[in-house]
Image (tube, grey):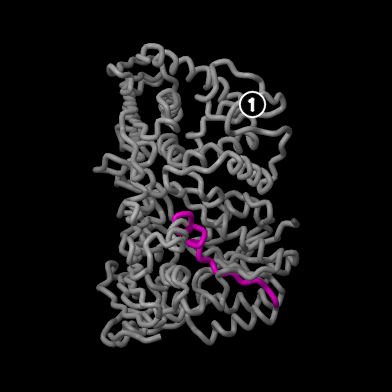
Amino acid sequence: MNTHTHRNNNDLHESLKMLFDKYDVSLSNDFELSGITSAPDVMHLLPGWKFSKDLSDNYVPLLPWRSNRKFIELKNIVETQTIEDVALMRLSCYSIDHDLWPLKAILYRELDLCEFLSGSKIATLNHVANKSGECVNIVVKLENGVLCSIEIGMDLTDSISMPPLIERHEIIGARGTCSDLVVDTQIPQSSIYAFTQNGMEIYNDIDMELFGYEPFEVDHIRSAFQAYQHPEVVSESILQHVHLYFLMEGVMETLPN
Amino acid sequence: MEPIRIAILSLTHGHTRKYYQTLLDNKNFEWVAVSAENETVRENFISLNNSIPCYSSEEEMFEKHPEIEAVVMASANNRHLEQFIMCAERGIHILCMKIPTFNMEEYEEMIALVEDSGIVCQVELELHYNPVVRRLKELYRQGAIGELSSFNATNITLSPVWAFPWQGNPEKSYGERVPLKEGDNRFRGGCLSDHPHVFDLIRWFTKSEFETVYAEVGPNLRKDLEVEDTMIVNGKMKDGTIFLFDPSWSRMEERLSIPGPGWEIHPKRMEVNISMRGDEGAIMADCFGPNVYHNGAPNDRYTVQYTYFDEWIGMMDEFVDCIRNGNEPKINLRWHKKTIDVMNACYDSISTSSPVEL
């Protein structure tokens, strides 16, 4: 859909309930997808970066990008050894919609994707930032020896003809490379380009069951659904949250306000 | 809702495998059995190590499983009428592959069988359940590009004939051996017979019917095929919308007997791109993109790894609704007949080297 409109939180809530009903997933308590409330029996299913380091019992830090099919396929390509002997990863992510994707959200997401796609933990991390703190370059060494660069930027201006994130995730092996960016391009493609009296608009509809949602909203609903369908992933995501928060905080603390 | 007890017939259609996961995931189906068209197909199915009983004949399957309520008719086009009769006699609902038949007398017989027996027959045109197509249709209906004047589309793929040989056999694909035209040693039943989608979509979008159509075949890319593998179609709808369609098998493939990694030689093995022009704007859409890309195993070629293919979920949800709630499928035999008519008109145009009025 148009990348600069998204649905309200009641819609997200109803769509998740629709999936629960359709696939016979039982609910033991109510849930919240939009923000933190004081209700004690409500499960808070939010992207992990929205929580602080310390989690209450009813907080579930989601890693929604792990439900995005392009990242699932990239991970599959690595895991099935379609590409072999991975040595290098080149990640970049520039935020156009700073409200939707603030710096800490991108840091949290990209550090997690680095580990998710490679299947290895971050062993060392070095970073530099520009004067404003809007651009951060990170070099990561993973426990399996893979070297990874992460470029993060908050300095792109808003545009309705761009998705909220301009990103690239490239994995390079001795046999083959894989990427979410098509060869010889710098920006992600969209499924629809409309040239109308409003100028050029783009649309990226990826999920018929959740039609009308932005891809990041689809990811949020799918990962919340998975947390109920496969509760075993929750304990893993809590551990990963603590780990990611430590890494993210380490970078954020050094940046100018 | 009680699950629908369903079986798959023949297992020889290229889309067969799309149903496996959908039937297992959808709680409204209980996948009861399959029948295999031949021993090779049966062995391939059994090698998947699932627990679904596989029979060598439809009769045996229906006899052993009287509980079957519906079938996915995943067979060669020339087997459809015979299977329609078997299902209608037993009151079994049908999800039919995209070409029920090219023989319009047979087609009328199928309509009568369905309507007289009261069964549901839904035709598999999965692009109706594609999210990009849905967005495109909404934009058009909302007037984003004003009055439509042009609808151009590709439905280009690799050729499935090496894995699904009936698609290269004129009798099994087209239903009979009809020469493409005088002096041409090829026959009807190739790429056009595999690609009805864009002919259907333009009717669905415009709510108009075909006025004229002109089709030409090019030389075959695969010289050993006896059916066409390249074609361009030009024409006009009754509402004045012009169209240009490319339904070719123009993406080359490795000649695998079972589809799998490395099937494609061209990076993207299947493309449906639509370009719509109106008096207030234009829209360009890629119904199966963007994706992710690699150049790894098995052939180290640049390859599109598709990231979404879930049209079958919505399509099967509609099938359930029609069976359990008595609704008419959006793509029923009567609706689909005019799509088959225009595809036959394309073959007639090739045969006469002239535009055909519909």
Residue B119 x %, y %: 68, 73
Quadrant housing the N terminus of chain B: bottom right
- Residue A85 seen from this side: no
Task: Using the image as rendered, state which of residue A225 and residue B102 is in the foreground.
Answer: A225
Residue A190 location in percent, x, y? 36, 48
Residue B32 included in the magenta stretch of the image = no
- Residue B220 in which image quadrant: bottom left
Residue ID at (45%, 81%): B341
Amino acid type for the residue under numbered disc 1 = Thr
**Residues in magenta?**
B118-134
Q: Nearer the viewer, residue B193 or A202?
A: A202
Task: In the rendered view, tell whether residue A237 sits above or below residue B326.
Answer: above
Crowd band around label 1 with a 10 angstrom C-alpha radius: few (<14), some (14–19), many (20+):
few
> Is A52 positioned to the left or the right of A145 in the image?
right
A251 w.r.t. B262: above or below: above
Q: Position of residue B256 (x, y in %)?
A: 39, 57
- The residue where tag 1 is placed is A37
> Which residue is rendered at x = 63% and y = 63% of the image?
B319
Relative to B259, B10 lies left or right: right
| Horizontal side, residue B184 vs residue B96: left or right | left
Given the current orientation, which residue lies at the most extreme front position? Answer: A197
Residue A175 in picture, x, y percent from top left: 31, 36
Q: Chain of mark 1?
A: A
Foreground pick, B285 / B39 = B285
